Image (cartoon, rainbow, N blue to C red):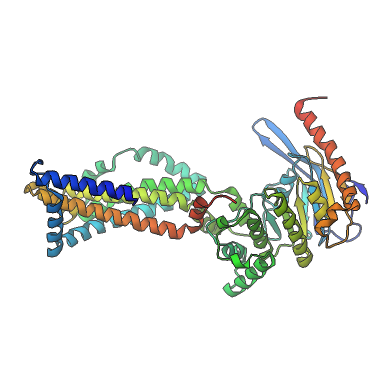
Amino acid sequence: MTREAAGLLVGLLALWQVLATGGALPGYLSSPADVVREVVALARTGELGVHSAVSLYRSLAGFALGAGLGIGLGLLAGAVRPVAGFTEPLVSLAYPVPKVAFLPVLMVWFGISDTSKILLIALSCFFPCYIAALYGVRAVDPLWIWAAQNMGASPARIFVRVLVPGAAVHIFSGLRVALALAFILVLASELVGSSNRLGLGFLLVSADATGHSALMFAALVAIAALGFGADRLLSRLRRRLLAGYLLAEETPRG
Amino acid sequence: MSVEPSRVPSLAGASPLVDVRGLSKVFVRGARRVAALEDLSLQVAGGEFVTIVGPSGCGKSTFLHLLGGFVPPTTGVMRIAGREVTGPGPDRGVMFQELALFPWRTVLGNVTWGLEVQGRPRAERLAIAERYLALVGLLAFKDAFPAELSGGMKQRVALARVLAFDPAVLLMDEPFGALDAQTRELMQEELQRIWLETGKTVLFVTHDVEEAVYLGDRVVVFSARPGRIKAEVSVRLPRPRRLEVKKSQAFLDRRNQVWDLLRAEVLKFRDEAEGAP
């Protein structure tokens, strides 16, 4: 985070705090200090940890499932034309439909359970990963493939050792979009309901039902923190795995 | 010094390592047919360094792509050590103009790639890769990524990568085309040293006449499109050739001779492009 971004954030929070303390804000806009107090109290009782862990499990399980399938099928569609001929029209058909619209259907099949939430998240994460992997493979330099063939590599080896790493930059862009979607959708699905009465989204609606404003904000802070942490971890992984590429972006061509 | 008409094999008796006969390639793009190569025959002896020059668009890169097995010919037969070329293979090490290094792999990882394909054990891969990195003077950079290297250093990595999987023939497509003049001269001297040390057979395409004469035992001059062999010039300058040889009269004579042959083709190509008679 740049110093300017941090400054803006602190400034807005300070303004919010001043207005709240001065009584200029309605009661449903809890002051930052109240929210912090609520977060600390929730963390002490262990409630925050449990709700966060449940939401994190649902989002990451859905993300892993959707991203895994999306990347796998995208790579295959990019490498094998007939596969793309099969998947592309289906993706064009399903991609524009809001995935939340599937939630009622999934709930009829699987109840208000973890399964319906995880499947909804997986479905949402699938598309950006599929598209990124497909274009990643199509963007692979054909000379890399010739060089690999020249060294006697089999098609299977070229797939694993050239197409996959060659598409990795695109794949990581897709993963980042998908990861954010996973956190958006875990909250949305928990707002609709949670069979075990757990999850940050469930915490949010139950706080709303009892008019507990600071608790609502505490739940929002928690989901934001989880999303922030996950995005940062992914970007660290990206820097590690794509060390050779990032250098290409950062150093001038010699 | 001699100019030999094309299609007369310059090697009598011994069977050549590279044997190309009646090769032609026509590219079909929709209704358009472009003849890139026409009835081309070339024999190269084992250990020989042959350079190929020609006007741009004469099909000299296409020739290497055919010989590399990446593109099938329209007619003709290509044999390497008696075996017909039917596809790409590690008996011919191709060094592309754009190098095609793998950016996600380190220098060492690029050089060991072909050895992994061959299923060599790890220790052996490392030993071979380090030997060739030392040969091209890049051992200290083995853990760097290609993007961290200068143009000349990338060329050396590409050369080490090709040498490491031990092909019988090196096919080099204007490998030094993108380098500045000084680096290019150093790389030429370097390549000659490595060629003398490894005894490889080299086919080297370039548009630089000086480079062709300096490096080649024999300079093959291609005609304007469709590419045919217009003439061959034997260089016959002693090895190892120092860079100063480029100032000698013997060198300049051969350079001028190749230049005159090439110039006629370049003019012909230009006239055709402009629709002149």
B194 and B232: which is toward the camera: B194
* Residue B71 horizontal/vertical position (percent): 68, 47
Left or right relative to A210: residue B144: right
* Residue at screen point 60% across, 71% down: B126
* Residue B153 horizontal/vertical position (percent): 64, 58
Residue B131 location, quadrant? bottom right
* Residue at screen point 69% across, 47% down: B72
Question: Looking at the image, can residue B94 be seen?
Answer: yes
A10 and B196: which is toward the camera: A10
Can you say whether B12 is above or below A16 in the image? below
* Residue B132 horizontal/vertical position (percent): 67, 67
Left or right relative to A187: residue B179: right
As drawn, the residue found furthest toward the right would be: B2
Can you say whether A101 is above or below A204 in the image? above
Question: Looking at the image, can residue A197 be seen?
Answer: no
A138 and B256: which is toward the camera: B256
* Residue at screen point 69% across, 67% down: B135
Callout count: 0
* Residue B233 horizontal/vertical position (percent): 88, 49
Residue B193 location, quadrant? bottom right
Residue A93 location, quadrant? top left
Can you say whether A200 is above or below B193 in the image? above
